[in-house]
Image: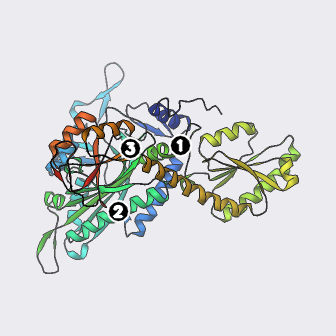
Amino acid sequence: MAKDFTTREADYSKWYNELVTKADLAEHSAVRGCMVIKPYGFAIWEKMQAELDTMFKETGHQNAYFPLFIPKSYLSKEADHVEGFAKECAVVTHYRLKNGEDGGVVVDPEARLDEELVVRPTSETIIWNTYKGWIQSYRDLPILVNQWANVVRWEMRTRLFLRTAEFLWQEGHTAHATKEEAVAETEQMLDVYADFAEKYMAIPVLKGLKTPAERFAGALETYCIEALMQDGKALQAGTSHFLGQNFAKAFEVQFASKEGKLEYVWATSWGVSTRLMGALVMAHSDDNGLVLPPKLAPQQVVVVPIYRNEEQLAAIGEVAQNILAELKAKGIRARYDDRDTHRPGWKFAEYEFKGVPLRIAIGPRDLENKTVELSRRDTLTKEGVPLEGLADRIEGLLEEIQDSLFQRALDFRAASSHRVDTYNDFKEALEKGGFIYAHWDGTAETEAKIKEETKATIRCIPLNAEAEEGSCIYSGKPSNKRVVFAKAY
């Protein structure tokens, strides 16, 4: 399998695009701005989905499903929300086609909808309209619901996984009796996302608050996790929103409290998307192809036979099946590739390119010596190891690889983090890439000016930010803490 593709140093953006397509993760579709997620890419997404779904259910959430189509009038009910999404909405205006004079089909002008339907860009409005019928009393609260779905946000400039007109995601929507419960929920789900990113994706993240200018449309606070990619750009990997009572008031969702008073419900929403696939590729992969953390790899181990005749293949196959049985007994995802359509060297290159964490090669000499050749994808090293105790060794190695990838990403972030005190130093640090910790005066005007002049944005106000007196790098006005700037995807 050829590895002739662009290097990260030559053109990081092109490297990413080529890797996603050549590794069979996804491809552009015939529909502009939309993608086809191929089986290998979808297998990785399914692993992400399964782990997240378990984490959601462990925190008391249940899955439900709500309509893809949202009446246009629903979006009008929350002013900030409609303003935030109006330019990204796809709108259904008719419900029927008819045969045209040239033999093709045309939209039937007689079939115009009484009210246009918006294709779901996010579900707050349709869900809160639904919750109105579910909530009458404090006994109906809290509602802890998650939805796995697709959404459409009409993007003009797209990139596979990172920004497409249609993408897959999950969106949690919860309803609470008190502000304190809703804030606790928002923070809890941010922690869930951070744990998933670090423990499964092996990507360290910063937890923080978005500035008012970067908040989700209709939220009182937006919490986020920010990850750093190998090119020094930030990627927003997940968000959790405290919505206050905005949507409850917009849709008249009230409940009778224990004291018998009629009160508005408190709300949250939170979500991650197939953008995480892009983060996974960009955070770990190299010029030899994908590098996947073992916990999310569709196949953690692959066994490849090296043989010259059917007799040798049969003997190797017997040993390989025993290895697979021992690995599967430990819950390790393993495959024996005895296809006769490709030579071993081609298979080695394929599995290296697709990021399989460990590869085992077995030949006639290995059978004699009761050994195998074990290759690691993260370090591209290989060694001969005894057959005895192999399953235990592999189990330990997979944990070691998972930890090593996280530490490597953590070290990269540390080396790519800068503290600056002047605007000139800020601009110099931007050329290097990475997270920049700097003072900001807290005004939208300064934030907008810095973005306009440098294309850098405030990624977050870190939750663990220490109080520190200083001066804004742009305006010189007083500041009491540093925020995190970066160029971003």
- Which quarter of the figure has residue 352? top right
The residue tagged 1 is 285
Amino acid residing under circle 3: Gly
Q: Is residue 177 left or right of residue 384?
A: left
Question: Label for residue 434?
Answer: 3
Quick check: marks 3 and 1 in contact, CB under 8 Å?
no
- Which quarter of the figure has residue 320? bottom right
Q: Is residue 223 above or below residue 1?
A: below
In this rendering, the label closer to the viewer, 3 or 1:
3
Quick check: marks 3 and 2 in contact, CB under 8 Å?
no
Question: Label for residue 316?
Answer: none
Q: Give the structural element (helix, strand or loop) at label 3.
A: loop
Residue toward you, 6 or 60: 6
Assign the C terminus to one quadrant of the image: top left
Report, in whole angstroms, how far the alpha carbon at label 1 lies from the one at label 2.
28 Å
Q: Is residue 284 left or right of residue 416?
A: right
Q: Give the structural element (helix, strand or loop) at label 2.
A: helix
Report if residue 158 is visible in the image.
Answer: yes
Q: Provide residue 449's location: percent of width, then percent of height.
A: 19, 38
Amino acid residing under circle 1: Ser
The residue tagged 2 is 189
Q: Provide residue 324's location: percent of width, then percent of height.
A: 72, 58
- Going from N to C along the chain, the mark reached first, 3 or 2, is 2
- Going from N to C along the chain, the mark reached first, 1 or 2, is 2
Q: Provide residue 146's location: percent of width, then percent of height.
A: 35, 60
Q: Is residue 32 above or below residue 315?
A: above
Report, in whole angstroms, how far the alpha carbon at label 3 lies from the one at label 2.
26 Å
Quick check: marks 1 and 2 in contact, CB under 8 Å?
no
Residue toward you, 61 or 279: 279
Residue toward you, 350 or 104: 350
